[in-house]
Structures are given as C-alpha cells and as structure tokens.
Image (cartoon, grey):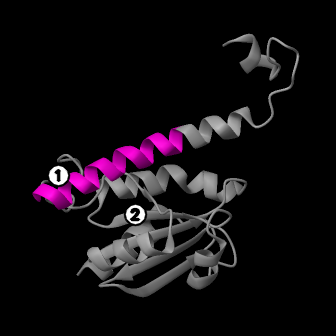
Amino acid sequence: MSETERNGVDSGGARQEGSELSERERIRERKREKLRERLEGASNDGSDADGGGGSDADGGADAGTPAEPVEVETPEEFRRLVDAHDVVLVDCYADWCGPCQMMEPTVESLAAETDAVVATVDVDGLPGLAQQLGARGVPTFLVYANGEPVDRFVGAQDRTTLETAIASDAA
C-alpha cells in the first residue's frame, strides 16, 4: 500500500478526497465496459453473452443471461433489459446502505446461479428511475416476468425468498 493509500495525502501534502469513491467508480466503469462488450458481441453474433458461465445444477443459466449483475445506467437501458429477458431480478440499492452491502454477495451469486438476469439500480445515481420503480426504501427488490413487475420485496431478504420468487416467475 502506498503512502497516499495509507493516509490519503499525496506527495505535495494535499488531501486526496474521495479516493475510495473514485476507485469504486473506476472498477464499476471497467465492469460496465466489459458487460457492454459481452452484450454487444451477443447481439451481433448471437453468441453466449456470459461466456458459458452459470450453474449446471439446473441445466445451467440461460445462455443469454449475464453471470454478473448488470449495473443499469439509464431508464432506457432498464426497459430494454426487462423487455429482452423472461425474468429479471432488480436490486435498487444505495452505496451508503448497510443492508444493501450485506445483500451484495447474495445478489452476485443469484446472477451467476439462476436463469434470471440480475439488474442493479443505484437509487442515488438514477433517482427518477428509482421513483418510477417505487423504490422508497433500500434495498428494494423487484421481480419482472415477461416485462411486467410481479413481485416486490423491501429490505434485506434471505436468498431463499429471492430464489423462490425467481423460480416461480420463471415457470
């Protein structure tokens, strides 16, 4: 760890504010770019958008289903995602929210291990979309089936609750 990383002060003595936040943003941007490339590749050549990932326990995740949560950046992207997939689990979250952080590993594993697309919506980054989705508290989980909202859960949920909602709407 560099001196700057340890104490947040650069070599000129200036305090580096938001270095942790900017690092998070750089990581998010890399993930978004990687996902965009995968999704564009899949739509251009019909190939598997998640590179063959997914669980084999139930026959594997849907070939067009990303193995990682999709960070929604615009309301239009959200609508396209919901319209393009049979089942979508939407996680409305905030970076500052403790229960949201607690749910992150569960959300990531559901993306990798189920046939549902998992979409994440930052309520601070997209307040209009959050309002449209009715996310008044975080985390809020919505399940969409065939483009329509069918389930809503507010607050931290156990994995089984979310899996059951996904499975019942996938049937």
Q: Position of residue 133 (x, y in %)?
A: 56, 82
Within-10-Å neighbours for mark 2: few <14, some 14–19, many 20+: many
Which image quadrant: the C terminus?
Answer: bottom left
Is residue 60 something that shows in the picture?
no
- Examine the rendered structure and indicate whether residue 136 appears above or below residue 91: below
Can you tell which quarter of the image residue 162 is in?
bottom left
Q: Earlier in the sequence, mark 2 or mark 1?
A: 1
Which image quadrant: the N terminus?
Answer: top right
Residue in the image at 88% along x and 16% along y: 13
- Examine the rendered structure and indicate whether residue 82 appears above or below residue 33: below
Residue under numbered circle 1: 56
Mark number displayed over residue 118 = 2
Residue in the image at 30% along x and 56% along y: 66
Residue in the image at 49% along x and 77% along y: 142
Q: Position of residue 88 (x, y in %)?
A: 37, 72
Magenta-highlighted stretch: main secondary structure?
A: helix
Within-10-Å neighbours for mark 1: few <14, some 14–19, many 20+: few
Q: Is residue 81 magenta?
A: no
As helix, strand or loop, the secondary structure at mark 2 comes to strand
Whether residue 2 sits left or right of residue 67 in the image: it is: right
- Examine the rendered structure and indicate whether residue 119 appears above or below residue 34: below
Specify the amino acid type for callout 1. Answer: Asp
- Mark 2 and mark 1 residues within 8 Å of each other at the beta carbon: no
Specify the amino acid type for callout 2. Answer: Val
Whether residue 151 sits left or right of residue 116 in the image: it is: right
Whether residue 148 sits left or right of residue 29 in the image: it is: left
Can you tell which quarter of the image residue 115 is in?
bottom left
The stretch in magenta equals 27-46
Q: For marks 2 and 1, give the CA distance.
A: 18 Å
